[in-house]
């Protein structure tokens, strides 16, 4: 594969490109879904091809081919150069890349058990067993279970002299129990957080042992009262925080978005470069670290899709806005000397774009458990899991729900609630954070379906967090 990628790069240079890179990639994905006691769907796909990206006459060109032969990669390279030349006629300014030192390396992700070597009947059997366990509880009318398994290999070569390769697996699974009465239906879900690991991440024992709790809480959720409008204290679990981090911090600090390059499709960002090192994004205990070297992180790939080494840096440090995710193209716009390994594509046929890193809310520095945090809260709401969300084009004004909610009274959980949403403005919300549990309770939750780009692409990344408390937040019933 290296020889073919090098052939593509050499062809592009011979045609007049001033920069070229080639990615030869193989992707495989298997998605399994069960509903009650039947298989609802099994998808198994594989894709293999080459993508060639070039700069010629100061403009980008990109072409791809599902045929990976010497002739095909040369043709793709020639087409990419032709596209760049055509694009140069209407380019407002030439593309400039910040430097990246050439490297020759291989990255192999953790995998003890190849998920695609496990028989499909065994995987489906586990999902059906989980559904049966959920349905065995009185009041549960529906059960769904799912499993997502991915692998991809890459060979990357560029004209700067980098020759890189990688192999990475991703595995995750979960289920949902739904309780129904004559007036309403309510669900409760559980997930083993997806990680870049092999099938060993599908923790069957943990999945089984949580079915009783999930089923009972689904039934309790059905009977729970609805909240009233007001302001209150929130304690959010790591899974709920993952989505809030993703939408209000992760997307807001993608540099291409902050520079206005995503406005036509996915909106821009309030976190513009003039606010860098000035904006109080959160309270002094809030630290967001872009952690693309995190063990088993969903964006821990060794290098990104433009050959930049994965790194770790602060997005928010002690509450102050400090950094962005940046590609080689946009890094120079704010004077960064180097990109930070956040330019990724979802296919060999897609051009790499700036994507969120593994963005993590770092744990508190003082010993603090969830139980202690709740006991220290006189009145409020505790929220677990992901739910609905809405956020404006600037990543500023938002509303989030959750999967399960409990009233906190006098430092104790006092029964479930339903229809809870919380609303805030991004900096106001993160500045209201006054406590974060310590590293013992730091959980690596993940997102497998982050959408961005035009044509749209889907990416994965981890958002680790520990339970955290937020004061004086507006809550309203979902309508």
Image: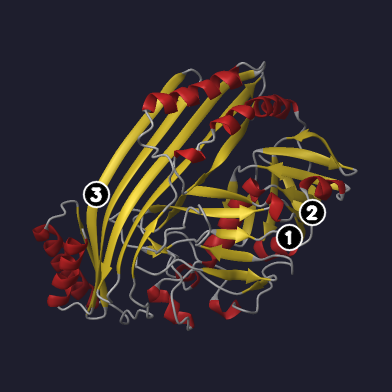
Picture coordinates of residue 104, whole percent (x, y) = 32, 69
What separation in Å lies between label 3 and label 2 (alpha carbons)?
48 Å
Classify 10 Å Cα crowding around label 2: few (below 14), some (14-19), many (20 and above): some
- SS of the residue under disc 1: loop
Sequence-earlier tag: 3 or 2: 3
Q: Nearer the viewer, mark 3 or mark 2?
A: 2
**Residue 392 can be seen, yes or no:** no
Picture coordinates of residue 265, whole percent (x, y) = 42, 59
- Mark 1, residue position: 364
User: Which colour assignment does the render follow?
Assistant: secondary structure
Snapshot quadrant of residue 404: top right
Measuring 56% from the left and 39% from the top, which residue is drawn there?
192
Classify 10 Å Cα crowding around label 1: few (below 14), some (14-19), many (20 and above): many
Q: Nearer the viewer, residue 424 or 201?
A: 201
**Residue 176 can be seen, yes or no:** yes
- SS of the residue under disc 3: strand
Q: Nearer the viewer, residue 425 or 248?
A: 248
- Mark 3, residue position: 48
Picture coordinates of residue 363, whole percent (x, y) = 69, 59
Left or right of 278, for residue 336 = left
- Mark 2, residue position: 368
Examine the rendered structure and indicate whether residue 136 appears above or below residue 77. above
- For the C terminus, the quadrant is top right
Circles 2, 1 touching at the beta carbon (< 8 Å): yes
Left or right of 473, for residue 251 = left
What separation in Å lies between label 3 and label 1 (alpha carbons)?
44 Å
Q: Residue furthest right?
A: 410
Measuring 35% from the left and 68% from the top, which residue is drawn there?
307
């Amino acid at each position: 594969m290296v020889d073919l990628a090098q052939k593509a790069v050499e062809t592009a240079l011979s045609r007049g490109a001033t920069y070229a890179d080639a990615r030869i990639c193989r992707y495989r994905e298997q998605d399994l879904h069960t509903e009650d006691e039947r298989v609802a769907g099994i998808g198994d796909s594989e894709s293999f091809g080459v993508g060639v990206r070039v700069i010629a006459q100061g403009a980008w060109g990109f072409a791809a081919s599902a045929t990976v032969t010497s002739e095909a990669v040369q043709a793709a390279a020639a087409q990419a150069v032709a596209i760049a030349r055509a694009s140069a006629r209407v380019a407002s300014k030439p593309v400039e890349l910040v430097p990246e030192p050439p490297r020759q390396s291989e990255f192999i992700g953790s995998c003890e058990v190849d998920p695609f070597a496990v028989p499909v009947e065994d995987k489906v059997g586990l999902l059906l067993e989980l559904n049966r366990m959920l349905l065995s509880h009185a009041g549960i009318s529906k059960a769904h279970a799912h499993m997502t398994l991915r692998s991809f290999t890459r060979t990357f070569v560029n004209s700067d002299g980098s020759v890189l390769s990688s192999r990475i697996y991703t595995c995750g699974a979960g289920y949902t129990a739904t309780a129904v009465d004559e007036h309403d239906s309510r669900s409760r879900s559980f997930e083993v957080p997806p990680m870049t690991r092999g099938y060993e991440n599908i923790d069957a024992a943990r999945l089984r042992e949580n079915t009783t709790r999930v089923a009972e809480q689904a039934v309790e959720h059905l009977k729970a009262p609805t909240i009233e409008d007001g302001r209150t204290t929130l304690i959010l679990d790591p899974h709920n925080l993952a989505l809030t981090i993703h939408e209000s911090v992760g997307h807001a600090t993608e540099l291409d978005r902050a520079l206005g390059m995503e406005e036509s499709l996915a909106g821009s960002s309030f976190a513009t470069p003039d606010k860098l090192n000035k904006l109080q994004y959160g309270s002094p205990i809030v630290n967001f670290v872009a952690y693309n070297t995190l063990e088993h992180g969903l964006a821990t790939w060794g290098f990104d899709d433009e050959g930049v080494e994965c790194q770790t840096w602060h997005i928010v440090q002690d509450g102050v806005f400090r950094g962005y995710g940046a590609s080689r193209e946009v890094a120079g716009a704010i004077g960064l000397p180097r990109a930070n390994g956040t330019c990724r594509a979802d296919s060999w046929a897609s051009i790499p774009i700036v994507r969120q890193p593994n963005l993590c809310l770092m744990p508190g520095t003082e010993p603090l458990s969830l139980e202690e945090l709740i006991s220290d809260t006189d009145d409020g709401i505790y929220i677990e899991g992901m739910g609905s969300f809405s956020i404006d084009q600037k990543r500023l004004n938002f509303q989030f729900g959750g999967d399960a909610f409990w009233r906190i009274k006098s430092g104790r959980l006092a029964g479930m609630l339903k229809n809870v949403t919380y609303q805030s403005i991004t900096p106001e919300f993160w500045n209201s954070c006054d406590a974060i549990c310590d590293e013992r309770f730091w959980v690596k939750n993940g997102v497998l379906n982050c959408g961005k780009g035009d044509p749209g692409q889907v990416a994965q990344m981890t958002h680790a967090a520990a339970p955290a408390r937020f004061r004086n937040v507006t809550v309203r019933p979902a309508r």
